């Protein structure tokens, strides 16, 4: 950030675009050349610094967060002052050239910590929404839906959905701000059929955790990255291999993978503006999230009695999936101990009757962070659920969010000029 070198924006802008083959294509999007992906990132004002190739997808660590390329979709998540929307038309044009047709896109982001330092159009919410509505894709304007969830003057979540197959080129659906309900926010994002995505966004990271993600000058970058990565292995034990990079003088990004599933973490540890995001995707199959057991291992990170954790894990009531999500959040919270956290869930394409709303109803109303002689509750369960009928794509089932605190004066207002 040239304008203010002493701060960094950890909040990511997340874009996921899905594609369908117009002609038979064995590799799909994975047939895109590395030079194309490098140019894509250049347009977004970031760069690829590491690549891992798996059987199911290509995972890239960027100078600002991560990029995942599947056969039929691409997800790019960038922090700092990046401009990922600038790369959308280029990507779709390049995909079209190899016979992959874009079907839809979801763009999401949380409210920025330093909105005035963002580059256009992200430095002004109204201009950003206008930019989204006027984006030129393959020579035509594509209709979209924008929603502001929460307080557009304070903490909020922005969602924009485009259906590239739509023939409607009329006005975008107006910005929707649901009735205010105690600092509630909500997020939806595209996901592979038969998967659930859980994303945990945290600010106000505990100082001990912040200090851990500063480089040790006596060790190599690779050694520092291994130490930082090892600290995350307890969060989701199924992801044994973590591929990560550390930054100068601090900060850490990593990707991990298991079959078609990924796990990505990004940490900005400067205490004055600390931020961390943890996103994991799981499949709904015999080896997936719904049938496996994720233990609560938060006691490994802090002084929580194992007997207490065991009693929580021995609870046979409710849904195993809900308990897995609960334990996943416990594990993440025990490492970072944030002052505020936003948890989003997306269920899409499940063969069962699973929905985020039903899952959320089984989660506890609060999650406790214990350790260092302290115990505090940092999550409060929301009651707002928006479904496909009243928000985004018709294949989206539902989503729910948890916020760590309720701020006073949050009235859910839109800024002047928003429709």
Image (cartoon, rainbow, N blue to C red):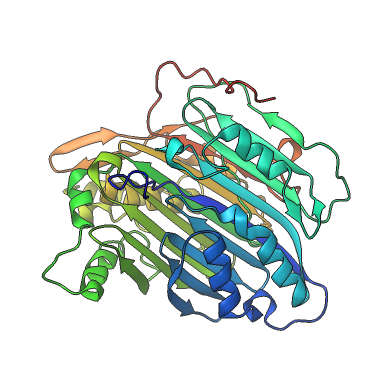
Query: 338 or 239, which lies in front?
Result: 338
Residue 405 left/right relative to 123: left
Residue located farthest toward the front when viewing the structure as drawn: 3
| Residue 24: image location, x then y, percent | 80, 81
Residue in view at x 33 percent, y 68 percent = 245
Residue in view at x 61 percent, y 55 percent = 86
Residue in view at x 25 percent, y 75 percent = 222
Q: Does 175 appear above or below 287? A: above
Query: 198 or 189, which lies in front?
Result: 189
Residue 169 left/right relative to 128: right
| Residue 82: image location, x then y, percent | 49, 53
| Residue 173: image location, x then y, percent | 76, 35
Query: 330 or 23, which lies in front?
Result: 23
| Residue 36: image location, x then y, percent | 60, 74
Residue in view at x 21 percent, y 36 percent = 375
Query: 9 or 223, which lies in front?
Result: 9
| Quadrant (top left, top right, bottom left, bottom right) of the C terminus | top right
Residue 68 left/right relative to 223: right
């Amino acid at each position: 950030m040239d304008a203010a070198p002493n701060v960094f924006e950890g909040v990511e802008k997340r874009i996921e675009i899905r594609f369908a083959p117009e002609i038979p294509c064995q590799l799909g999007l994975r047939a895109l050349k590395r030079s194309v992906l490098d140019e894509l990132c250049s347009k977004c004002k970031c760069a690829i610094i590491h690549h891992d190739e798996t059987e199911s997808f290509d995972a890239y660590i960027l100078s600002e967060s991560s990029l995942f390329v599947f056969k039929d979709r691409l997800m790019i998540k960038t922090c700092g002052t990046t401009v990922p929307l600038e790369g959308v038309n280029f990507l779709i044009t390049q995909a079209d050239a190899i016979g992959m047709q874009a079907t839809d896109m979801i763009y999401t982001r949380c409210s920025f910590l330093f909105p005035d330092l963002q580059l256009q159009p992200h430095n002004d919410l109204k201009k950003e929404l206008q930019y989204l509505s006027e984006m030129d894709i393959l020579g035509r304007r594509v209709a979209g839906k924008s929603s502001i969830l929460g307080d557009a003057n304070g903490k909020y979540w922005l969602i924009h959905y485009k259906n590239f197959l739509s023939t409607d080129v009329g006005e975008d659906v107006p910005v929707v701000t649901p009735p205010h309900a105690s600092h509630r926010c909500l997020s939806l994002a595209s996901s592979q059929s038969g998967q659930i995505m859980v994303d945990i966004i945290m600010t106000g990271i505990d100082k001990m955790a912040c200090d851990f993600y500063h480089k040790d000058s006596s060790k190599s970058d690779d050694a520092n990255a291994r130490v930082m990565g090892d600290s995350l292995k307890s969060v989701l034990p199924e992801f044994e291999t973590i591929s990560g990079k550390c930054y100068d003088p601090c900060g850490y990004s990593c990707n991990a993978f298991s079959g078609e599933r990924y796990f990505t973490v990004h940490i900005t540890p400067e205490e004055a503006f600390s931020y961390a995001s943890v996103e994991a995707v799981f499949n709904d199959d015999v080896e997936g999230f719904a049938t496996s057991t994720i233990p609560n291992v938060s006691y490994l990170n802090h002084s929580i009695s194992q007997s207490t954790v065991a009693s929580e894990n021995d609870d046979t009531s409710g849904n195993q999936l809900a308990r897995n999500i609960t334990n996943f959040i416990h594990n993440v919270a025990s490492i970072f101990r944030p002052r505020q956290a936003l948890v989003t869930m997306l269920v899409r394409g499940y063969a069962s009757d699973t929905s985020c709303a039903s899952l959320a109803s089984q989660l506890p109303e609060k999650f406790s962070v214990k350790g260092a002689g302290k115990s505090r509750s940092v999550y409060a369960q929301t009651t707002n659920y928006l479904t496909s009928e009243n928000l985004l794509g018709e294949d989206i089932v539902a989503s729910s969010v948890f916020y760590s605190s309720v701020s006073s004066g949050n009235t859910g207002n839109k800024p002047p000029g928003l429709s």
